[in-house]
Amino acid sequence: MFKNLLATAPKSSSDKSIILPKAEYLNIPIQLLAGFLDDTRLSIRNIYYYSLYAYFVKLSKGSEKDKYKETCDWLGFQLLNREENLRLGKVLYARYQNSPMTGIERNLYSEFNNLEKTDFEKACFLAYHALKSIAGNKTFQKADNKLLWARMDGKVRAVKELSELSERMRFYSQDYQTLKIKRELQDNWGLVYYAQQTRGYYVSFRLDLKSLISEAVKRKRKSIDKQRLQKIRSMESQVMGALEKKNPKSKSH
């Protein structure tokens, strides 16, 4: 499925290879991760089909054959089964419109496509891309475990009950397993994580820990100030109501 990570054009008269540009990420809807723990190969194939068609359909110039070749060159895929691959990709592309997206690094895609991985490694892959989909283009984002587990399971919205998760995913929703995954993502996947005295937690793949803590504390302070103001307004309303009961005539003046 994958060609060499660097494709080269035919040698020129100067006998130098020209390195063609390559896509760094495969941007896919989070739903394509559903069933990844049960049948990783099938999920990888669906990512492949979707990525092919999603890039192909954006090209406006050239024949179908030319556009398919450009797509494969860009993605680093082999020129195989054009009609069938585009047909399958079109189905997935139409099915998942306006979905939360996540970006899979090409090298990481290739690694999970070609090498055997443990279930824990697969769970980390899912958690990483789940959190990437939650963060989106923002420098940081607040999340909670029910949304994390849902996205790992290929769902768009947070689950309310663990019974909504697939059987394999429920295993990783255990506190110990979730904590183990988060630690691995912080150690080896570039996750920056903060969860001190907050409802949920803050995540980032762009900020350092100090900057993330700063952003979280600012929002915590705003939340406290908002709660304090709401409490004052509620008390004011109670006082005004009590005064009106004591002096009903004052309301008309």
Image: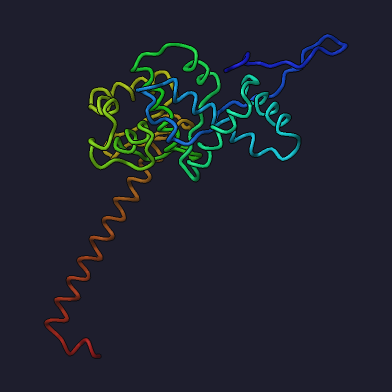
Residue extending furthest toward the left: 246
Q: Observer-nearest residue: 54 or 206? A: 54
Q: Residue at x 39, y 26 (%)?
A: 126
Give whichever of 178, 22 is nearer the camera. 22
Is 4 or 124 nearer to us in this picture? Answer: 4
Please report the residue visible at 64 percent of the width from the left and 38 percent of the height from the top.
57
Farthest residue to the top: give it: 15
Q: Left or right: 224 with respect to 187? A: left
Q: Residue at x 31, y 56 (%)?
A: 226
In this image, 191 relative to 85: left or right?
Answer: left
Q: Is residue 114 above or below residue 216?
A: above
Q: Residue at x 41, y 33 (%)?
A: 131
Q: Give how far across and how far down residue 157 sits, in percent.
A: 35, 43
Q: On screen, 141 above or below 39? A: below
**Which quadrant of the figure contains the C terminus?**
bottom left
Residue 148 percent across, percent down from the top left? 34, 34
Q: Is residue 16 left or right of residue 179?
A: right
Q: How is the image coloured?
A: rainbow
Residue 159 x, y percent position in the rendering: 29, 40
Q: Quadrant of the N terminus?
A: top right
Q: Quadrant of residue 252?
A: bottom left
Question: On screen, 9 above or below 92?
Answer: above
Q: Can you give x and y, in whole percent of width and height, for residue 122 in the image?
A: 38, 20
Total residue callouts:
0
Q: Residue furthest right?
A: 13
